[in-house]
Image: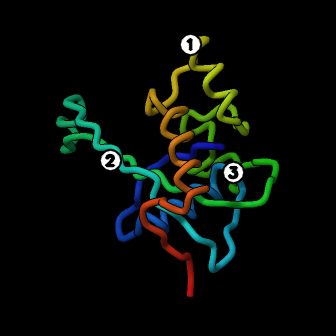
């Protein structure tokens, strides 16, 4: 599992932002017809953002099944979406046992209960009870 993050640009859909972020941060170009499942939506009120005109953050997390690949940024180092320019200095794949182990050793995931949420999500996918599904492209 890898988590990318970023904002939705003006006029961009959540799926559009997801596909852009996956390319910028991981170098992944999704083929048309790939299926996305909404894993969960997190509303996080943040008073410190009020000065900028925002009341908080909404994190929409999707599950996308892709073949294994080696993550490499998909944009040049001077581009706005380049990972280190957004505070991302390392990318790696995590198994759920590795996530539980890392959390027990003090690694902080966002959300903090990500290992538990991911485990429940993978069980729901295996049982075909995952919430909604969106298909990218025609």
Q: Disc 1 versus disc 2: distance between alpha carbons? A: 25 Å
Rendered residue at 63%/47% (across/down): 82
Q: Which x, y percent locates residue 56?
A: 25, 40
Label of residue 50 in the image = none
Q: Give above or below for 116 relative to 120.
A: above
Residue indicated by mark 1: 106
Name the image quarter holding residue 135.
Answer: bottom right
**Closer to the camera in the image, 63 or 123:** 123
Residue indicated by mark 2: 58
Q: Which x, y percent locates residue 7?
A: 42, 52
Residue lying farthest top? 105
Sequence order check: which comes first, mark 3 or mark 1? 3
Rendered residue at 66%/43% (across/down): 1
**Closer to the camera in the image, 42 or 85:** 42
**Closer to the camera in the image, 46 or 24:** 46
Label of residue 26 in the image = 3
Sequence order check: which comes first, mark 1 or mark 2? 2
Report helix, strand or loop for mark 2: strand
Count neighbours of disc 3 (C-alpha within 10 A) and say few if under 14, some if 14 to 19, many if 20 or more: many
Report helix, strand or loop for mark 3: helix
Q: Which x, y percent locates residue 44?
A: 28, 38
Report helix, strand or loop for mark 1: loop
Name the image quarter holding residue 24.
Answer: bottom right
Q: Please identify, in this view, whether the residue under mark 3 or under mark 1 is nearer the observer.
A: 1
Q: Which x, y percent locates residue 80?
A: 55, 50
Count neighbours of disc 1 (C-alpha within 10 A) and say few if under 14, some if 14 to 19, many if 20 or more: few
Q: Give above or below for 110 relative to 125.
A: above
Q: Disc 3 versus disc 1: distance between alpha carbons? A: 25 Å
> Left or right: where does residue 122 sit relative to residue 117?
right
Sequence order check: which comes first, mark 3 or mark 2? 3
Rendered residue at 41%/52% (across/down): 60
């Amino acid at each position: 599992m890898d988590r990318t993050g970023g904002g939705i640009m003006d006029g961009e859909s959540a799926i559009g932002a997801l596909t852009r972020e996956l390319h910028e941060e991981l170098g992944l170009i999704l083929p048309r017809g790939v299926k996305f499942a909404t894993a969960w939506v997190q509303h996080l009120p943040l008073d410190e953002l009020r000065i900028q005109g925002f009341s908080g953050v909404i994190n929409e997390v999707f599950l996308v099944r892709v073949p294994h690949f080696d993550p490499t940024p998909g944009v040049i180092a001077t581009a706005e979406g380049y990972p280190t320019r957004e505070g991302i200095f390392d990318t790696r794949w995590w198994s759920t046992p590795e996530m539980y182990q890392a959390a027990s050793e003090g690694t902080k995931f966002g959300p903090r209960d990500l290992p538990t949420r991911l485990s429940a999500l993978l069980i729901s996918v295996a049982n075909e009870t995952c919430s909604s599904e969106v298909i990218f492209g025609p």
